[in-house]
Image (cartoon, grey):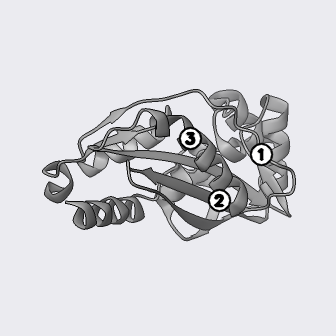
Amino acid sequence: MDLINNSKYKIVLGSSSSRRKQLLEMTGINFSIKTLPVKEDFPDKLIGKQISEYLVSKKTEPFKKIITKEEIIITADTLVWFKNKCFGKPKNKNEAKEMLSLFSANTHSVITSVGFLTSQKFEIITESTEVSYKNLNNDEIDYYVETVNPIDKAGSYGIQDWIGMIGVENIVGSYTSVLGLPIPQVINKISSIIENKS
């Protein structure tokens, strides 16, 4: 991470997500956190990655007014896409249980878009990962939701949680993207920005 940490750029994570913070910390990259409030709504006509990319652009917009020449600001959005429908964070425990029942014995897509803002330009990368669940019974779903209360998680689950350990049979794509930040791709993009701008 010397290229990144020794560059003139300061990395800023524009997200309040504890999981994204933990993922970035594990890389050894020096960074700070700065969050600005944004209403996370989107036009009904958007589908799949169009939604996550729209929301990342929306989350980035307030930072354009305050970014300095020495900053790379990273924003992100993760959603679940299943049967032509977007699943974000559940409103309550009942909705969380309904989501998990739908995902049971099925495969869904977890889409994470990441925005990279400098004073010169804004770029987005998007990763889509296929996640397959076994047939979850009601006891397993109830236990997880009542124990963890996953209302802060897109699709009502964390793959690193108990439900992921006992329920996810297969994953095709980036594991860290399902957690909220596709780390190898993020590091590559930051390095690319630094190498092109230093």
Q: Badge 3 is on which residue?
A: 61
- Let me know if residue 69 appears in the view: yes
Measuring from the top left, give residue 1's x and y in whole percent.
19, 56
The label shown at residue 110 is 2
Q: CA distance from mark 1 to mark 3?
A: 14 Å
**Left or right: 153, with 12 as reference point:** right
Which class describes the residues within 10 Å of circle 3: few (<14), some (14-19), or many (20+)?
some
Measure how far apart labels 2 and 3 are at the Cα level: 24 Å
Helix, strand, or loop for circle 2? strand
What type is the residue that disc 3 sits on? Glu
Q: Quadrant of the C terminus?
A: bottom left
Please give left or right for residue 184 compared with residue 70 in the image: right
Which residue, given by chain and number where applicable, does mark 1 sit on?
42
Amino acid at circle 1: Phe
- Label 1 crowding class (10 Å Cα cut-off): few <14, some 14-19, many 20+? few
Is label 1 in a helix, a strand or a loop?
A: loop
Q: Earlier in the sequence, mark 2 or mark 3?
A: 3
* In this view, the mark in front (2 or 1): 1
Sequence-wise, the earlier of marks 1 and 3 is 1
Disc 2 to disc 1, C-alpha distance: 18 Å
Which residue appears at 52% of the width and 28% of the height? 36
Q: Is residue 74 left or right of residue 188?
A: right
Judge depth for marks 2 and 3 and give the one in front: 3
Q: Is the residue 8 above or below the residue 149 in the image?
A: below
